[in-house]
Image (spheres, helix red, strand yellow):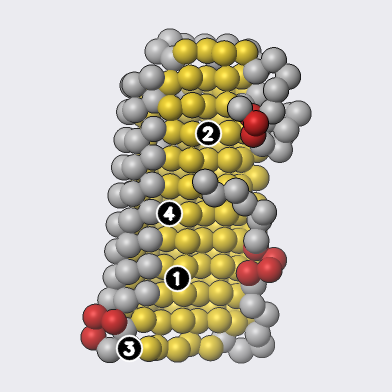
Amino acid sequence: MLKSSLLAAGAAVLLSACTYNVSGQGENRSVESAGLVASRNVDVPGDAEFSGMMVGADGDVGRDLALAGATVRSNARVGRNLTAEGGRVRFSGTVGGNAEIAAGTAYIDAVIDGDAEIAAGRVTLRGEVRGRLEMDAGHMNLHADVNGPVEIRGQGNRDGNGRVEVSGRLARGGTICAAEVEFRRGSRIEGDLLVISENRPRGNGFRYEPLAGRDCDRI
């Protein structure tokens, strides 16, 4: 489980000039960039790591991509796993493995072949998660199709239990716990889904349990 203390400030490497290092050869060639502004178009068969106050990484990464900064923007095709931490994180593209994201505000529009773990103050998730989804946030807009089970916990807003808006497809059910849960037009619920909230959301196809003053983080 990704339990986040939002690491953006500590992750920013405040260097006056950007450094860009390439290591390895052939299929093992990897890149690392750090600086006040660490931004590149990248095409490497290995790993890529970017850290700084303002981070931008676009292109193709054959293995893992790691991003850390106050502001992170990336449009990339990642062969294996994605890790992104920042005050504001915006990622679009594809991820061949798992994705872990910790942010104050996150906007994700991606196809993720593995599992996704997201912790944020506010998050909008679009695209598709082909594995399971674990998400903790104050306000969540879930527009993605999720093929695995979901474990969603509201935090921060409204008595600490947040709000979730669902307009995507939940193929294997799971659990959603938040002060407020809303199923928007176009949402599809498949599998066994348990909703725990202050009031029963409109709609059908899920089991409901009153929150009754509890903390979602302890259910």
Mark 4 = which residue?
Answer: 99
The disc placed on residue 24 is: 3
> Where is 38 relative to 141, above or below?
below
How far apart marks 4 and 2 lie (CA) works out to 16 Å
Task: Nearest to the eye among marks 1 and 2: give it.
Answer: 2
Residue found farthest to the right: 159
> Where is 99 relative to 149, above or below?
below
Q: Closer to the N terminus: mark 3 or mark 1?
A: 3
| Crowd rating for badge 2 (residues with CA inside 10 Å; few <14, some 14–19, many 20+) | many
- State left or right for residue 58 relative to residue 202: left
Q: Closer to the N terminus: mark 4 or mark 1?
A: 1
Q: Closer to the N terminus: mark 3 or mark 2?
A: 3
Q: Residue at x 32, y 76 (%)?
A: 46
Residue type at numbered disc 2: Ile
Q: Foreground residue, 172 or 86?
A: 172
The disc placed on residue 152 is: 2
- State left or right for residue 21 relative to residue 61: right
Q: Closer to the N terminus: mark 1 or mark 2?
A: 1
Q: Closer to the N terminus: mark 4 or mark 3?
A: 3
Mark 1 = which residue?
Answer: 57
The disc placed on residue 33 is: none
Tag 4 near tag 2, CB within 8 Å: no
How far apart marks 4 and 3 lie (CA) works out to 25 Å
Q: Closer to the N terminus: mark 4 or mark 2?
A: 4
Q: Residue at x 59, y 78 (%)?
A: 37
Residue found farthest to the front: 218
| Crowd rating for badge 4 (residues with CA inside 10 Å; few <14, some 14–19, many 20+) | many
Per the image, label 1 sits on a secondary structure element best described as strand
Residue type at numbered disc 1: Ala
